[in-house]
Amino acid sequence: QAQLLLPKMDKHLRWLVAIPIIFLGMQNCVFCVKTKLTWVNGIGHNLDHMDEGSEPISARFNANVDFCHNPTSMTTDTDYVGFLGDLTQAGYHKLGKITQEVDTLVEHLRNAIKYVGKNGKVVHIAHSQGALITALAAKNLTASEMSQVEVICFGGGTAITRSRYPHFSRVVNYYALNDPLIDIVPTARRALRTGFTFSQNGSGGEQEFVFLTPRLGDPALDHWLMGPTYLEALAWEGRRYQYKYQSIARRTLRPLVLNAAVFIDNAMGSVSINLHAFIQQYAIPLITWCPVLYARIRALSEEVLSVMIAKYVVNLIVYLYAVFEHMCYMLRLMSGNERFDPIIVCDGRVVSISSVVVPTK
């Protein structure tokens, strides 16, 4: 290529030009791992939100993001009934229920793994409820498949750690310090309280938990993936992704940021005041109160069940068994199978009454 571009250049100078060309070619062909960037959302996201959210993510990672949509029950941004429906579904996921959203994500991740090949990497972003769906989807992935997946969680409804999911290639959990979901994730709360946020098995001492200073001071907005708190962490992860998996040529030819500031301003303006107040006054206390309510209901149900078994169930079983025995006896009588032949003992011998002749006068 150097000879074609500079045919009259001195031989030594041609080599100086050829070396960086060869290096860039090796970067693209040898050193770069084939990757796929994926994303699963939390509650309250329709397809328009997914398209809008894909732009800042793609800009920070310098790569197209392939999202897996977790559908919402909300028809508008102020549909509070739909919002409660989303919270209910997230509660089912918290309790370990496998739903259609989980099966869809399993298929999505397997398609991404197939796309990158056996030596490739899938970098998977999960936000809020998306972390719950990802944790459930991991139960249906093989160890080999999980070894090709890096999981990055933001404000997750559960923490994905190496102690529970040792086969993932990498796991990291980002939480704003005022994120309300910390209160329902014991491992995150414990890591924040103790300060031990490093993995202990196989990730080179890399942090599994990263706690972020809130940029807005509002729990709802600081929990939002497109808010400034988590967008800054997305930018960190994007730079790591580029330096680890992209060639120099790709990093320099494609812009690092695609109108991110404009998108943030427009997206933040779309959040209504009523929804904001509802989340602060009702949703956050509800999320905090749910674990306590669940524990109380469970304890009460166990107590009621033990009383019912002791007072009613045992007596009912005895009564039903007696009725069953009586019915069997009546059936034997009706069919002639239940016969009695009275006997007497005469001179040490057992004699049937039917064979005794009674003399007449």
Image (cartoon, rainbow, N blue to C red):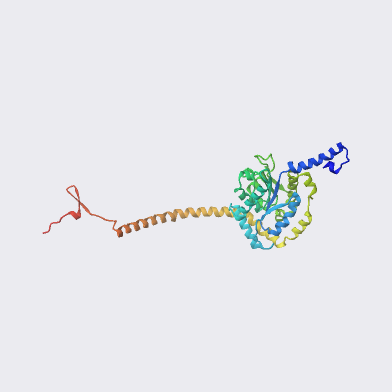
Expressed as whole percent of the image width and height from the top left, the position of residue 224 reads 71, 54
Q: Can you give x and y, in whole percent of width and height, for residue 83 in the image?
A: 65, 60
Q: Which residue, as the protein is rendered here, is positioned at the far top? A: 12
Task: For the N terminus, give its image quadrant.
Answer: top right
Left or right relative to 352: residue 227: right
In the rendered image, the vertical position of residue 8 relative to residue 358, given as above or below: above
Relative to residue 205, is residue 276 depicted above or below?
A: below
- Answer yes or no: is residue 216 visible: no
Nearer the observer, 177 or 331? 331
Q: Residue at x 53, y 54 (%)?
A: 300
Left/right of residue 213 with respect to residue 342 in the rendered view = right
Judge by depth and name the residue closer to the eye, 38 or 26: 26
Is 275 displayed left or right of 328 in the figure? Answer: right
What residue lies at 19% left-to-right and 48% top-to-bottom?
349
Q: Residue furthest left?
A: 361
Q: Is residue 320 visible?
A: yes
